[in-house]
Amino acid sequence: METRAVSGHGGAGAASQALHKTRVHHMIDSDEPDTGDQAGLNPLDRLRRRYGVMRVNVVTALVCFTIFASVGVWLTTVYRLGPQARAMAADPAAAEAFINGLLVARLALVLALAVSVFLVFYFGFIRPLEQQRRRMKAALDEASDTNELDLLSYWYERRSKQLKVALEDNASLRKEAEALRASEETDRRLLDSGLGFSADALVLVDRAGVVRGATAAALHLLGYHDYQLVGKSFLDTVELYDASKDHPEEYRVREWLDVTLQKASSIPEVGMFKLKDGHGKDHDLLATCLCVTDSSGHAVGGYIRLELADAGRRELPKAMSVSSRKDPMTGLLSKQVFESRCDELVDIARRQDDEHQFVFIAIDRLHDITAKFGHWAGEETLWHVAQAVSREVGAVGDGYRVSTDRFGVLVAFSKVDQVMDICHRLRLAVEAHEFSWQGEPFDTTISIAVVSLRPDGEGRRGLLTIANDLIKQIQADGGNDCRVYAASESLFERRRNDAEWSDWLFTRLDGGFGHLISQGIRPVLDDHADLRPWAEVLLRVEDDDGVWITPGTYLPAIERRAETTRVDLWVLARALELAKTTEGFLSDHAGFTINLFGASLDSPDFAKDVNRIISDSGVSPEHVCFEIDERFASAHVSTVRGFVEATRPTGGKIALDRCKASAGLGALRALPIDYVKISDALVRRMLVDPIDRAHLDWINDAAHQLGVKTVATGVEQEDWLQELRRLGVDYAQGVRVNKIGPLMV
């Protein structure tokens, strides 16, 4: 504001000065008459006004010079005539005086000439130059004032713009802050709502260990009210003591949560503690902390799952009596939900003559990714593909995790053309995604098979078989493609082949061409007197030319024909007979283990048949251990639980096979498992990949916290065995431990 006032006031003065300078410049330099006011000026100034200062000064100087020069010439003439005058003068004294006068006049003339020269030089050169200098200085001063004014105006405009931008940014920041507050409030409400719906004992903490939320089950277990726990440090409020000490009450736990969050690891941390609840009662507590990280890998908080530990049989919580609708690792719907929905759509298609689409998705070369980068790289790939499936098909259908590395999508009341567009978008999205593991990129593609559910089409099992066969054809051709199944004679050809494989297998089993071999499972430490070795029984079938055929050749056909129970019961009966007749086996070994098909567990009479065969054999059920795949157990907890409840009370043992994912912890908690068999994929990479080693260590620790023994499979080298000893694994299985076991027929 002050700048504007000065500029406005100075504008009139500047205009006046400019007018005055213009008139002076005109008076000095102009050749034109000046018609300005001439009153009060002397004649010389009027001439200067009229003809210009320089011209008048020069003319005046020339006139003066002429006059003085004329006088000088006259005096000089007189001076030159002086001697003659002296000679003619009668009076010498007068002549002398006359001569002296001439000398004085001469001196005066010289002085006048000097003055004239000075005046000419001053008025003709010095004064005009001085006036020119003043004019230039005035012009420079005026230009400087103008430049300064322009500069001030420039900075004023710039500061105004900056102020305007700052005000706009401030308004934008206020809006963003309001949006963040609203989002925070929404997230808080969603968190409270989500925690309210969960029946598990969960506590949510931030990265400082301060409680941000807790489920009703957690508050009840800990013996606190919501206001007593939320907003306070978890370990400072909840009294946890180290259960591994002889006197736990002397060892208060205060750093377990901080250490876990500082690791920022995706692997859960398990701990066994003594809990003194809010009512002063003591409990044995199993706590599992899962760290939550941001996109840069820094911890932002974590979830603590609490469970009262029971050294005896662990009952399934009511909240887990029905399997979760979602797969815990991918977030897609579970296999059980898929089976129910698929059966429903098949029934609708047959009753209402409608058409639906089943999209079957498989990750190409997932085994190569796992073999090169480790198990967790494969899990990460599965997760990213699952998110892509959820994004691309979420608006038109439901995504499911159908098997370990297979996803499915059911799109009701749709045509093939509509679904194929979505499939191509999904395939391109996965292909364009930049997959990497520990900074090393790798390419990932998917193969997609589309099968229509029609009134005259296959049921769920046949649908999966068709889709799986089509996936194999796509991957055999290089993968990364989408294809639609076209019904042809190949379906009937495959069925005929399956029937032939079934006849071939059971004819040989009944004809004495079925063989059992075994591989030893031995304690890692020799001084473990309480651990007795086991032997895993494996099936081989002899062909006509005497070659023993591995199960991978014929079992897919048996699974498609739903005849797995016959195979499992045959193996069980022969293994019991072999164990009973092999001298010293039952006295030197804890028993034998056999693998069960997941489809066999779905059979309602399978558990009864198992108990009957064991009872008829005369072998104690304590010598029999049933291996169940971890993925199947995690996805079908209720099915597995039914089998376990029917067989374990007789003394039979249960092992969780190929355990390599944290999802298996749910099965460990929910089922009375006796053994956990750690996947060979983790064992092979534990010395080269610290993440796989940490994951193996975590599985071993979690199993031991629950009173479960661990078995490392696929042990092929001595240094692997030494590392397993350091980690405290109970058993080892593999060619380094034993190639051929004691049971063979």
Image (cartoon, rainbow, N blue to C red):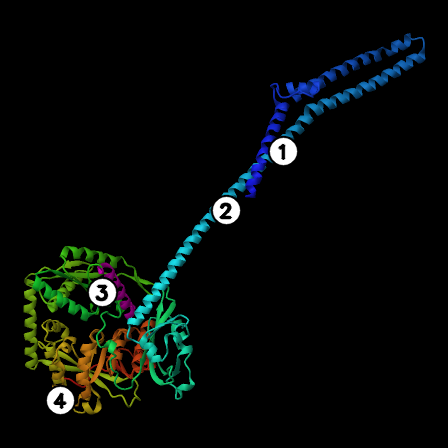
Would residue 695 be found to the left or right of residue 59 on screen? left
Residue type at tag 2: Arg
Pointer 1 with pointer 2, Cβ within 8 A: no
Q: Main secondary structure of the magenta part?
A: helix
* Mark 1 vs mark 2: in front: 2
Pointer 3 with pointer 2, Cβ within 8 A: no
Residue at which label 1 appears: 137
Residue at which label 3 appears: 365
Pointer 3 with pointer 1, Cβ within 8 A: no
Q: Is 60 drawn above or below residue 439 in the view shown?
A: above
Would residue 29 be found to the left or right of residue 110 on screen? left
At mark 2, the secondary structure is helix
Q: Position of residue 339 (x, y in %)?
A: 16, 69
CA gap, disc 3 to disc 4?
A: 45 Å
- Would you call the spot at circle 4 few (<14 residues within 10 Å), some (14-19), or many (20 or more)? few
Quarter holding the N terminus is top right
Q: Is residue 84 magenta?
A: no
Q: Is 696 drawn above or below residue 651 in the view shown?
A: above
At mark 3, the secondary structure is loop
Residue type at tag 4: Ser
* Mark 3 vs mark 4: in front: 4
Instruction: Read off the magenta span.
Output: 372-394
Residue at which label 4 appears: 615
Indicate which disc, 4 or 1, sits on the residue closer to the N terminus. 1
Residue at which label 2 appears: 159
CA gap, disc 2 to disc 4?
A: 95 Å
Residue type at tag 3: Arg
Indicate which disc, 3 or 2, sits on the residue closer to the N terminus. 2
Q: Quadrant of residue 671?
A: bottom left
- Would you call the spot at circle 1 few (<14 residues within 10 Å), some (14-19), or many (20 or more)? few
Exactly how many numbered labels are in the figure?
A: 4
Q: Position of residue 698 (x, y in %)?
A: 32, 77
